[in-house]
Image: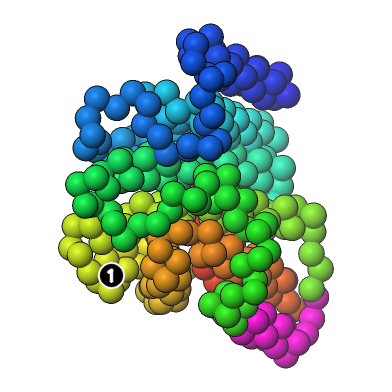
Amino acid sequence: MKSIIIAINCFALVFSSSAFAEDAKFFSYKPFEKPYELRDSKSRSPNYVFPALGSFLIPGLDQMIERQSPYWMIYSGTALTGAGLVFAGVNRMYAKGEYGEFELGPLTADIGLRLYLFAGGMSALQSFRSAALARKHQSQFDFMKVEDEHPIDVALAPWTFKHITSTKTWIPLAAGLTVFTGVMALAGGNTSFSVGKGVSALVTSHNAGVWEEAVFRGWLMPMTREWISNDFWSNAIVATVFAAAHISDQNSIPWFQLLSGWYFGWIVQENDYKIGEAAFLHAWWDVMALTFSYLYTQNTIHKNDAFEISLPPIKVTF
């Protein structure tokens, strides 16, 4: 399994590095200063739907077409690494008979899936913003003021702690922490916490906070806003889609995701469609919710109760 992972990562490195050979202008180009510049677009009205969708499914696709180096290298390399981890994890599951959620096989596959979704969300966001900003000369997407929100700012948003100073962020986090702590104090019992669960909570929360906000509030909501020219209803529509994506056997009526999705959308609109603060809040709410969920399910008093307060990411079972 180690040789497979090494081979996949070497392929990703060679594949990504080939961009330097084909891009003679790379060293005269300042990609980190102009992340949304369309270098090879044949039209001043680039499509903002299908390239973004393709980039979500195949991370780095539109960036490669538009020669937005080194972004396509980063997104495709991250996605290939994630796919390699999924393959390795599933292989270990069947070879070792590891099917527990926090055993190495399933945990590796889950982390790999999160990496792939993270790369896809970031790639879709950059594809959409590049096209939308290029249309501003036609008085489209004038409500977006995202030129100074760099893709790196979005990717690292969960670790940008200046967001905690905003009342829109610290009040819900403080309220959630109070509720979770209070419930655990009343429950008592066993509250052990493993390394695997800690890694799972951090990786899942970071990636969900970034890629879900990138796709739902960074791409779908401003696109809907441009179509219907209404902030409230564009937010409501996307919040409904966001909630529907979280329907599962354990969450048949995702009312909390509907309300939280609308709140995240409101924050994004208040920030001129920058998604950094919403991604920060989303990620750290998930950290608290997942940690609470892991601790609560071990509790000896309430181990058979169905109690959940969380904002779970989309989950795939192998």
User: Which residue is depicted at the point 21% across and 52% down?
Assistant: 139
Q: Amino acid at mark 1?
A: Asp
Q: In x, y percent, where is residue 57? A: 39, 36
Residue 300 visible in the displayed image = yes
The quarter of the picture where residue 20 lies is top right
Q: Secondary structure at mark 1?
A: helix
Percent across and percent down for residue 285 are: 60, 69
- Horizontal side, residue 238 vs residue 312: left or right: left
In magenta segment, residue 178 = yes
Q: Which residue is mark 1?
A: 231
- Residue 96 place in picture, x, y as percent: 70, 35
Position of residue 117 measured from the top left corner of the image (x, y, whole percent)? 49, 44
How packed mark 1 is, by other alpha carbons closer than 10 Å (few <14, some 14-19, many 20 or more), is some
> Chief secondary structure of the magenta span?
helix
Q: Which residues are magenta?
A: 173-190
Is residue 50 shown above or below 307? above
In this rendering, the answer to whether 284 lies above or below 10 is: below
Q: Which residue is pictured at 27% across the width and 66% down the height?
A: 234
Q: Would residue 152 appear left or right of 178 to someone viewing this image? A: left
Rendered view: 134 above or below 64: below
Asked if residue 249 is among those painted magenta in the image, a careful observer would answer no
Task: Please indicate, yes or no, whether residue 237 appears anywhere in the rendered image.
Answer: no
Instruction: Please indicate whether residue 185 sits to the left or right of residue 65 in the image.
Output: right
Q: Quadrant of residue 159?
A: bottom right
